[in-house]
Amino acid sequence: MIRIIYIGSNEQTISHFKDILDTPLLISNHIKEASKLCSNFPGNDPIIILYERTSLKQDIPNISYLKKKSNRVYIVLVTSDLLKTEEKITYLKNGINDTITPDVEKVRYQKSIEFIIARYEQLLPDFLKSTPLTSFRLPMWKRLFDIIFASIAIIILSPLLIVVAIAIRIESKGKIIYKSKRVGSNYKIFDFLKFRSMYNGADKRLKEFDKLNQYKEEVEKEEKKHISINEIDSMSFGDDDMILVSDECFIQEQDYLEQRNNEQKNSFVKLENDPRITKVGHFIRKYSIDELPQLFNILKGDMSIVGNRPLPLYEAELLTKDDYIDRFMAPAGLTGLWQVEKRGDAGKLSAEERKQLDIKYAQNYSFWMDIKIILKTITAFIQKENV
C-alpha cells in the first residue's frame, strides 16, 4: 500500500490533493514528525512525500534529512514557480525526485504516481519484490531497554572507541567506520555500522576467497549440469523433463531446483583466515570490538541489543522462502542466540543450525531470555572465536 504525506500548511493545496487522491493523505507541518511517520509504516512500499516549497535555504536541509532517515521516500516538490536551472540542480542533488504544481489535474497526478511505483520497483532488490511481509513491531519494553543500555554503553566505552578509531586510521588508508546495507526486521534495509577491519576494496574480492567459506558444504564434483546451446541437438530428454532456457545454456528444471536449494543451505558467508583483514582488524574482531559502532544503530532504532543478526543483501536474498521468513519477523540484534549457543566448543555451527536458532529466537524471545544472552555474550568476549 502506497503512503502519501503532505508537508506544508497551504490549506487550499491540501484540500485540492485530498480531492484528487484515491488514497488517504497524511498532513504534517514538521520534518521530524513526517520522518517518524515514515519509520512507522510497515513493509517496503514506497512513501510519497509532497513537499511544499518554501525557500531553497530552508528546503535543502529538510529534504536531505528525510532522505537520510528512510530509503523508501520519493519526494515531490510542490511549487507553482518555475525553478531556475541552478535551483533545479540543487534540489535534484539533495533528493528531490520530481516536481508538481499545487493545482495539478487528477489525470496528470495519477500518471506521476504510476511512474513513481514503476521506478521504485525497478530500484528495489529483486528478492524484496515478491516477499510476503507480516508487520513486526518492537515491544515497548525492548525499545526502552535498548535506548538505556546503548546510551550507557557508549558513555562507558567512549575512550575505547576513540583509541580504536586512531589505530585504524594509523594502520591503513580508508574510512574508520565501514557502512554496509543490511536487512533487518520486516526486511527493512539500513546502513549497518562497524569499525573497518579490512583493507580497502575488500567487498570486491569476496568471490576470490569463496573456497574459504566455512559454511560452504563440501560436495563431490559432478558432471556439469548446464548444456551449451551447441550441445542441445545431440541431447535427449524425457517427456516429463522441464527445460529452462537462458541466453547461454539449457538446464533441466530439477537440476536448477537442486542448485538453488544448495545455495539456500549455504546462504551464510564467513571466511577462515580471511586475508583481507588488517592487523588491527584481527584484534578488534577477536574481541568483537568492531561491532561497537552498532550501538548507534540501536539508538536510531535500526537494531536491538539482542536479536537476529542483520544479513547482507546477498545472504538475505536466499532466505525468502516461507521456512525462513520468521527470522525477519523479529528484532535485528547486536548479539543473538546463535552467537552464544556454542561459543568455545570445538565444533562450529552449520548454516542450517544458525537459521534454526534465529527462528527459535524469533518465536520465543523475552526479557529474561535477552538478559541471559547478554550475560553469555559478555563472557564470550575473552574467547578466541570471532562472532
Image (tube, rainbow, N blue to C red):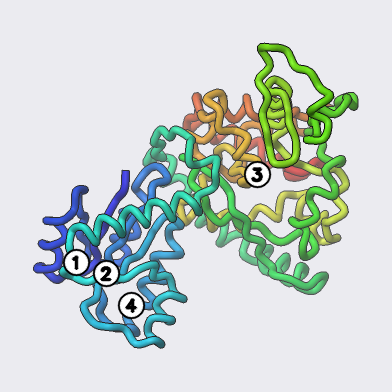
Q: Which residue is mark 4?
A: 59
Does dot 1 land on a helix, a strand or a loop?
Answer: loop
Q: Is residue 162 above or below residue 359?
A: below
Measured Cα–Cα span from mark 4 to mark 2: 16 Å
Amino acid type, label 2: Ile
Where residue 192 appears, as percent x and y from the top left, is 59, 54
Residue 31 horizontal side relative to residue 367, left or right: left
Compared to residue 200, the image places residue 305 above or below, namely above
Q: Are marks 4 and 3 in contact (CB under 8 Å)?
A: no
**C-alpha distance separating marks 3 and 1:** 41 Å
Q: Going from the N terminus, do you reach mark 3 or mark 2 first?
A: 2
Chain-order first, disc 3 or disc 1: 1
Q: CA distance from mark 4 to mark 3?
A: 36 Å
Residue reaching furthest to the front: 233
Q: Is residue 108 left or right of residue 386?
A: left
Specify few, some or many for label 2: CA neighbours under 10 Å numbering under 14, 14-19, or 20 or more. Answer: some
Q: Please tell me which of labels 1 and 4 falls first in the chain.
A: 4
User: Which residue bears the numbered disc 3?
Assistant: 314
